[in-house]
Amino acid sequence: MKLKFQNIFNMFAVALLLTGGMMSVAQAEHDDDDERIPVAKNALWQTECGSCHVAYPPRLLPAESWRAVMSGLDKHFGSDASLDTKAAKEIGTFLEKNAGSSRYQSSGKPDLRITETRWFLREHDKVADRVWKNPKVNSPANCAACHTQADSGNYSEHSIRIPK
Ligand code: HEC
Ligand code: HEC
């Protein structure tokens, strides 16, 4: 009798675990709609593409854009960000695998800048001109000036501090 009770208890626990798991899947899908950026990480990408600026989240550009960025690293926005073939291949694969949908695309040809996509402009349309012109911001590509957790890929509203 004691054993049987234990079994029923176990089944109940399993059912609870299952519903819990289903709820977290639903939650993750909701977050996806919510502009929150799922954290996708690759150690090589983090060090190589996070040395001059924050390692921009792969999801914020479509695969075609990452391909274009990765094929012009020797002339990268006025810098030389070249990588050896092996590193470039690993990072390129990681970026394309975690790339965003074409809604991060504005024009016919691939956008090289997140900051020029329609998505970015709309998301930031309440940021005043004088904020963009603040020397502490300097460039809209300087995400970390306002997104204090950008280093760890967290762009949530709660971690935004506009520099004064
Ligand atoms: C040697 C320094 C350097 C390295 C290394 C580097 N970048 Fe950049 N990157 C820059 C500079 C400079 C800019 C222009 C920033 C600005 O406009 O303020 C830039 C801009 C960008 C932008 C456009 C930002 C925007 O305006 O939306 C993307 C995308 C980008 N880099 C991706 C990468 C990726 C991917 C890697 C790794 C393969 C990488 N970068 C490595 C220097 C670097
Ligand atoms: C001058 C400050 C500033 C800079 C620089 C900046 N942002 Fe933002 N960002 C904001 C503000 C303000 C919002 C709007 C928050 C809101 O909706 O209330 C925002 C919103 C966002 C959101 C949506 C957050 C959410 O939870 O709704 C993302 C994602 C984001 N920014 C990414 C970036 C990226 C990537 C960069 C760099 C390429 C960047 N931002 C540069 C200030 C900035």
Image: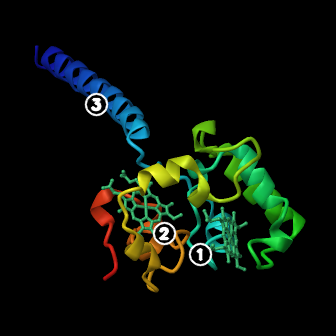
Q: Residues within 10 Å of mark 2 (few under 14, many from 20)?
A: many
The residue singled out by tag 3 in the image is 20
Whether residue 83 is visible to the viewer of this picture, yes or no, is no
Q: Mark 3 against mark 1, which lies toward the viewer?
A: 1
Relative to 100, say whether 58 is above or below.
below
Residue 149 lies in what quarter of the image?
bottom left
- Asked whether 164 or 41 is in front, the reply is 164
Q: Amino acid at mark 1?
A: His
Ligand 1, seen in the image, is in the quarter at bottom right
Amino acid type at circle 3 is Gly
- Could you tell me which secondary element the residue under label 3 belongs to? helix
The answer to whether the beta carbon of the residue marked 1 is less than 8 Å from any atom of ligand 1 is yes
Query: Residue 12: x percent and y percent?
Result: 20, 21
Which residue: 70% across, 52% down?
111
Instruction: Give the labeled residue for mark 1.
Output: 53
Q: Is residue 58 above or below residue 161?
A: above
Which of discs 2 and 3 lies nearer the camera? The answer is: 2
- Tell me the residue at 45%/67% (across/down): 150
